[in-house]
Image (cartoon, rainbow, N blue to C red):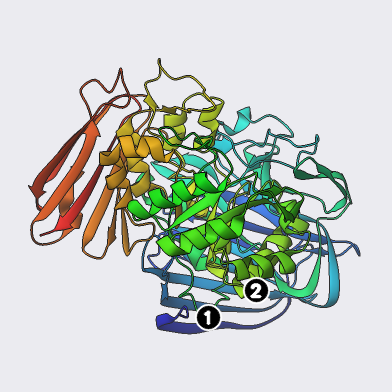
Amino acid sequence: MKFKAIALICTFFPFGMVLAQSNKTFSVKSPDGKTNLTVSTGSAINWSVKHESTEIITPSSIAIDLADGEVLGKNAIVKKSASVSVSETINTPIYKKASVSNNYNQLTLTFKGDYGLILRAYNDGVAYRFFTQKKGEITIINEEANFNFKDDDKAFLPFASDYRNKDKFNSSFEAHYDNINLSAIKKDTLAFLPVLVDVGNSIKAAILEADLQDYPGMYLTPGAGQNLHGVFAPYPTEEFLNRINYSVKSRTNYIAKTSGTRSFPWRVVVISTEDKQLADNDMMQRLAEPSKIADLSWIKPGKVAWDWWNDWNLTHVDFKAGINVPTYKYYIDFAAANKLEYIIIDEGWSDDGDLNKLKLDVQQVVDYGKQKNIGVILWSTWYGITRDTEGLFTKFEQMGVKGFKIDFIDRDDQKMVSSLYEIAQKAAAHHLMVDYHGMYKPSGIQRTWPNIVNCEGVKGLENMKWGVDNQPGYDVSIPFIRMMSGPMDYTPGGMRNASKSNFRPVNSNPMTQGTRSHQLAMYAIFEAPLQMLADNPTIYQREQESTDFIDAIPTTFDTTVALDGKVGDFISMARKKGTTWYAGAMTNWTPREITVDLSFLGDGNYKATVFEDGINADRDGTDYTKKVVTVTAKDKLTIKMASGGGWAARFEKQ
């Protein structure tokens, strides 16, 4: 299936030729007229954004510094300007909705010196990107990307702190959010995207990037006043293998060498007037390059039985559980019985550095999976898969493997970003899906290469094995922030659920913070075309009622509706597939009562299967109540959630 743009309306409003003019001001407004993106040129290029009467971004300089001394943006002379209005619909078959509206006004400025700037204004945000039209290759020393705010606003910032080999650009891209004033950000710290800023008047601004392609990712660090500005990893010059992580020992003085004729990544600000709007935003789909895969029929989203989080901890079986054929046959039997699509064989099936050195009879497992109609996905490190990407993909495609979960990426310098696009391209040529684990935010790459069915870049359930504070608070933050960047491999589904006072980190039988209903709700709230069941088959079979509910939830949808929420406090969301709706709600450690308006259902009666926190869920997180009721779109449900609690429901048309 090809991505098709329909209902396309393009109207050009040429400003005409503007010769050798500096100190000019241009603007482009959103289709609804509420958001205004302004750019001024002259000795420098400055951009600013205003939403009605609220200043979102005050004048902020932008530029690209080249190795030959030229600065794109310094003494900028406009040669030509043109504007266009676009209204189209993008088909999105492997996404949280079947199609996305792409309506915007665009201004293109072409400058003397063979470069230019594209600026877009949407009803829910703005974006700009540089482009160059130079011959040969160019070397970029730095990009100046500034985001100046009028006031000392509060922001949600995930700081890079899990450095590998003392390289501040070698990070896991996993962190809880610090909710602090801009003035409180420590000098020289790096926040990775997305970052969310509360600019007042119930308006929030999220800073993202899109369509990286052969370019490093952007971090944000504080400057003078209420400034956040971009920082980019220099290109690596020396790397070494640190067990299974390929780390950087030294870097050069430039951030990228790239084609002189190209478009650069989008710098994006999403604007919301209600928090719930952030949880249902499509900016990455709009801005990313369209799919490079013509036939998507072989890409099969679905759910996965996973081994690593539960430590291969099967019980009541007649074999020694572990990384062996009987164990994986058991996982396949479980997957087949519960109508899952895949199992993952995590680390230990091969030598980490040489995937040709097998420690498990993978072919026997794959063949058994074929008999049960269950696909097998293999784990690998980025280092391992890049030793011979083409040869390995050829070998495992022939074996019948369906894809790879690629881990320990932990960087987004130009070399790594380019590698991830290249791996996805080669995987697609072999009809292999890819789950980029151990990776930064996806930033639209999954639209360009839809065989990338998930990405990590989230502090997910694995962290419960060694313990973190306030995971429920994080759970109700990421739908508004991290999830805007794309799907996230959080790996939900833990069945040993604990209250705040009872939780403790356990490796082999890990617990989760919060209630059972909190975990079930994640399957309706967290976007993940390839979604895992993190716990072991033994406990899922013991908790079959919960397992049956999870099994019935799809991983891609036709419609998504963000119902209500507040960043860090709670979230409620509904998604539709066919005629059935799936809904979920979660709260932080604060018990909460909310109302869910069912007007999204449409006409007729619906059978509602509902899981909610039990009366003792504040003491025992596994306590829940299941009920089946008939509802209509006219109904409103009052939901009581315990501390760290949740609510989940399936609505079937009768």
Where disc 1 sits, the SS reads loop
- In the displayed structure, 408 sits above or below 592; it is below
Mark 2 residue type: Leu
Q: Does 435 sit left or right of 599 as displayed?
A: right
- Please state which of the two labelled residues, at mark 2 or mark 1, is closer to the viewer: 1
Residue 213 seen by the camera: no
Q: Nearer the viewer, residue 615 or 269?
A: 615
- In the displayed structure, 136 sits above or below 32; it is below
* Residue at point 62%, 54% (across, down): 361
Instruction: Specify the quadrant that holds the N terminus.
Output: bottom left
| Residue 109 circle label | 2
Residue 569 x %, y %: 37, 32
Residue 632 x %, y %: 9, 53
Near mark 2 (Cα within 10 A), the count class, few <14, some 14-19 or many ≥20, is: many
Return the residue found at the far top.
Answer: 501
Q: Nearer the viewer, residue 277 or 162?
A: 162
Q: In which quarter of the view is residue 247 placed?
A: top right
Return the residue found at the far front.
Answer: 318
| Residue 294 circle label | 1
